């Protein structure tokens, strides 16, 4: 096994590709089939502490049963003595919102196509009693075929259990329905629809309908739906968005109304779902019925004495093919939520330079081994911002620095990354 990896059941678990309040998402490979998967790792003690066992078991069971082409598939659930591992489909196309940053905004035709796929996914899950409650840019991915994939459906909501609105509000309040912000009981379906409306607006406009510097002003504007549509929105798009961004959940348009709206109906092709396949929940029961003692064998790699070594398989998957030019050509670097650069400087010099630049930007710095977490206030003051940088050895005297957003707004992260890398330019290798 490679240094820095561990094996959980039939999966070799590698680098971290995302993290949240109660979970980390790691890249992994099924050693029997060679298939790439994403593994969501949750700590049992946290689940028990927040009394989340029944909630998580129920929602994971539903998510395993839910099958839809526009939803990331949950494959199985495993556990070690201390962790729960949720094995998910690995989606290779990046985030939908990377396209917005690159193109400034999407055409109405393309926005409608993605919105139709989003509503199809949301409608399917609502029909199964599953509500996302945290729809936001980070949860909209693109498959290899370019189609939308909603991630964390049913799993994001469980992360808020025990720290309900505090976690939600500190996350992305720009996408949250007013009734959720009011700290009262709310209808999950209506709240999801509001978030879909904000997402549609951002797709077409390239910016948020509600985006104030201070939270009280933001909440006030969200609560009164105080926004305006740009001049390039068609009358049909404006009509639908106004019906969705209705601050009263009782009169807000529902899924059926959205699907019957003339703007939505344009070029709409409904998804033909395959017949429900037999799905076993034995693995979920095994993990949660005996949460304190059921486990699979978990083998750790060697103790870390230097940067993690990234193997060829991970490099190929990372670059989604054999073309590694995007690692070296800064013009191809479109600043995705997880971005990377290459350096020929020693690993220790890379880390110390990162720390020095971060401190000059008044960011809090936490370094452990060859992984650094940077924390600060978001530039728009809407909440906390954090990024994680990790150094990997890809060849002798050649290191890759993996940069990913941990918390905060995705669009703000893009601005941070460009500014931060400009200050690191002297250690970034640019082969001639």
Image (cartoon, rainbow, N blue to C red):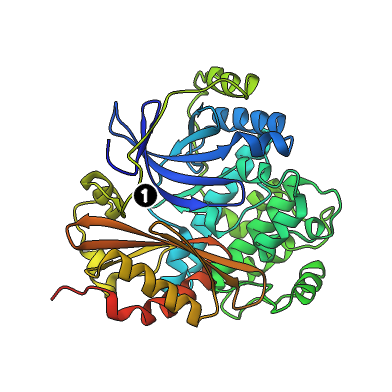
27 in relation to 413, above or below: above
Residue 240 is at least partly visible in this image: no
Mark 1 lies on a secondary structure that is loop
294 in relation to 315, above or below: above
Residue pictured at 69% horizontal, 46% vertical = 256
Q: Quadrant of residue 59?
A: top right
Q: Position of residue 320 (x, y in %)?
A: 28, 52
**Counting other residues with Cα less than 10 Å from the Cα at mark 1, is it few (<14), some (14-19), or many (20 or more)?**
some
157 in relation to 210, above or below: above
Residue located beneath label 1 in the image: 92
364 displayed left or right of 298 = right
Q: Position of residue 424 (x, y in %)?
A: 35, 78
Q: 185 or 111, which lies in front?
A: 185
Q: Position of residue 198 (x, y in %)?
A: 64, 63
Looking at the rendering, in which quadrant would you find the N terminus? top left
Q: 276 or 239, which lies in front?
A: 276
248 displayed left or right of 417 = right
Q: Quadrant of residue 347?
A: bottom left
Q: 59 or 297, which lies in front?
A: 297
Q: 409 or 21, which lies in front?
A: 21
Residue pictured at 25% horizontal, 62% vertical = 399
Residue 294 is at least partly visible in this image: yes
Q: Position of residue 7 (x, y in %)?
A: 37, 32
């Amino acid at each position: 096994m490679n240094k820095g990896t561990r094996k959980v059941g039939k999966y070799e678990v590698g680098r971290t590709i995302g993290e949240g309040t109660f979970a980390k998402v790691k890249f992994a490979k099924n050693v029997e089939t060679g298939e790439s998967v994403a593994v969501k790792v949750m700590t049992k003690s946290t689940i028990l502490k927040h009394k989340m066992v029944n909630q998580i078991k129920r929602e994971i069971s539903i998510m395993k049963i839910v099958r839809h082409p526009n939803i990331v598939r949950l494959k199985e659930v495993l556990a070690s003595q201390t962790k729960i591992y949720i094995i998910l489909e690995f989606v290779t196309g990046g985030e939908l919102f990377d396209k917005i940053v690159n193109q400034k905004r999407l055409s109405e035709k393309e926005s409608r196509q993605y919105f139709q796929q989003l509503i199809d996914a949301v409608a399917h899950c609502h029909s199964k009693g599953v509500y996302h409650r945290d729809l936001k840019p980070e949860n909209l991915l693109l498959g290899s075929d370019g189609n939308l994939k909603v991630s964390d459906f049913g799993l994001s909501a469980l992360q808020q259990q025990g720290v309900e609105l505090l976690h939600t509000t500190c996350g992305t309040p720009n996408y949250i329905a007013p009734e959720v912000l009011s700290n009262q009981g709310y209808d999950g379906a209506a709240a999801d629809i509001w978030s879909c409306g904000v997402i549609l607006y951002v797709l077409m406009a390239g910016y948020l309908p509600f985006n104030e510097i201070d939270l009280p002003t933001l909440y006030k504007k969200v609560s009164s739906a105080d926004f305006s549509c740009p001049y390039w929105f068609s009358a049909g798009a404006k009509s639908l968005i106004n019906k969705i961004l209705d601050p009263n959940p009782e009169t807000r348009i529902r899924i059926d109304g959205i699907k019957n709206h003339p703007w939505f109906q344009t070029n709409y092709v409904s998804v033909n779902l395959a017949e429900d396949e037999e799905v076993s929940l034995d693995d979920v029961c095994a993990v949660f019925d005996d949460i304190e003692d059921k486990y699979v064998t978990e083998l750790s790699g060697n103790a870390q004495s230097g940067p993690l070594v990234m193997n060829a398989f991970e490099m190929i998957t990372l670059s989604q093919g054999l073309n590694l030019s995007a690692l070296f050509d800064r013009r191809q670097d479109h600043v995705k939520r997880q971005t990377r650069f290459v350096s020929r400087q020693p690993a220790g010099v890379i880390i110390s330079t990162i720390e020095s630049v971060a401190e000059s930007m008044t960011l809090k710095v936490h370094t452990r081994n060859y992984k650094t977490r940077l924390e600060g206030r978001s530039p728009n003051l809407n909440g906390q911002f954090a990024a994680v940088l990790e150094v990997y050895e890809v060849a002798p005297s050649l290191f890759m620095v993996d940069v990913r957003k941990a918390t905060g707004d995705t669009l703000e992260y893009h601005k941070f990354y460009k500014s931060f890398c400009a200050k690191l330019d002297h250690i970034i290798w640019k082969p001639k």
